[in-house]
Image: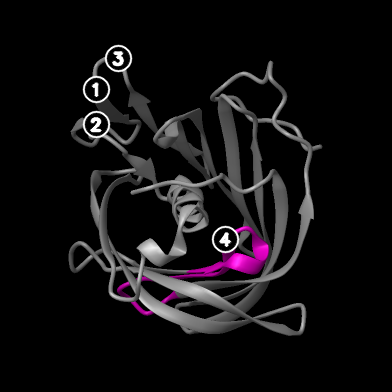
Amino acid sequence: MALGMLPPSSLLNYQLTGMDKGFTYYANGELRWQHNPQAYALTLSVKAFLIGSRHWRSQGLIGEGGLSPLKFSDSWRGERASHFDREQQRIVFSSNAPVAALQPGAQDQISLYMQLAAAMAGDPQRYPPGTRLQVQTATLRDAVPWLLILEGEEPVTVSGQTVTASKWVCQPRSQYDAKVEIWLSPHHAWMPARIRITQVSGSYIDLGLRSMEPLAPLPLDAPVGEKTTSS
């Protein structure tokens, strides 16, 4: 995919509505995005009463092709991770799932958001409704091509104001996979104004953007693959 500028380092705050086993709950979420010319760190965090905190993290390098993840992790009841071994061109999973061959342009399930944002920032006209993209996307158990379809523009409410966002949908790869919907807002540097993840069971989390504020760039000496500090 053709890329434009990556979004500026920012902290996005979300209101989360979730449903699990027939129980509806509300929580706070945030997306913390920091980068410098060579590297990036991205964390999606969710905090809910009775459920606790969960953090998805992606860290890696930045090159001509955009983001090149090195590690993707999920911290909830212990940490699990997927490691991008670029020397041996493979992705290794801490879950002991079979090793996957690393394909050009591969992302993980949250770095994909920023890669799409950069694509839309480059030239939105290159991506008319109906556009289909295939991107190898690593989860904690596999790294297979995700089919992304741009459904079109839809209104999204942010802080009481309606903005127009481009809705991308990742169709489930199998009968067990979740459906992921992402609304990218040009008014927010093409970052997600809404994210909805729906499981096969019908359980879901739906994050709606409440606010966005600037963060300091990622320090040049920040260890890649380590958790970074806030601004």
- Would you say residue 191 sits in the magenta stretch? yes
Mark 3 or 4: the one toward you? 4
Q: Which residue is mark 2?
A: 102
Q: Which residue is mark 3?
A: 87
Residue type at mark 3 is Glu
Query: At 34% across and 76% down in the image, what residue appears?
Result: 129
Q: What span is in magenta?
A: 183-203
User: Is residue 135 in view from this perspective?
Assistant: yes
Residue type at mark 1 is Gln
SS assignment at label 3:
loop
SS assignment at label 1:
loop
Q: Which residue is mark 1?
A: 89
Tell me: 153 left or right of 156. Answer: left
Towards the viewer: 115 or 77: 115
Locate residue 209, reporting x and y percent: 67, 69
Query: Residue 190's mark?
Result: 4
Locate residue 231, reporting x and y percent: 81, 37
Density class for disc 1 (Cα within 10 Å; few <14, some 14-19, many ≥20) is: few
Mark 1 and mark 2 residues within 8 Å of each other at the beta carbon: yes
Disc 1 to disc 4, C-alpha distance: 30 Å
Badge 4 or badge 2: first in the primary sequence: 2
Badge 1 or badge 4: first in the primary sequence: 1
Residue type at mark 2 is Leu
Q: Is 70 situated above or below 9?
A: above
Q: How many marks?
A: 4
Mark 1 and mark 3 residues within 8 Å of each other at the beta carbon: yes
Disc 1 to disc 3, C-alpha distance: 6 Å
Q: Is 56 situated above or below 199?
A: above
Locate residue 113, reporting x and y percent: 48, 54
Residue type at mark 4 is Trp
Badge 1 or badge 2: first in the primary sequence: 1
Disc 1 to disc 2, C-alpha distance: 5 Å
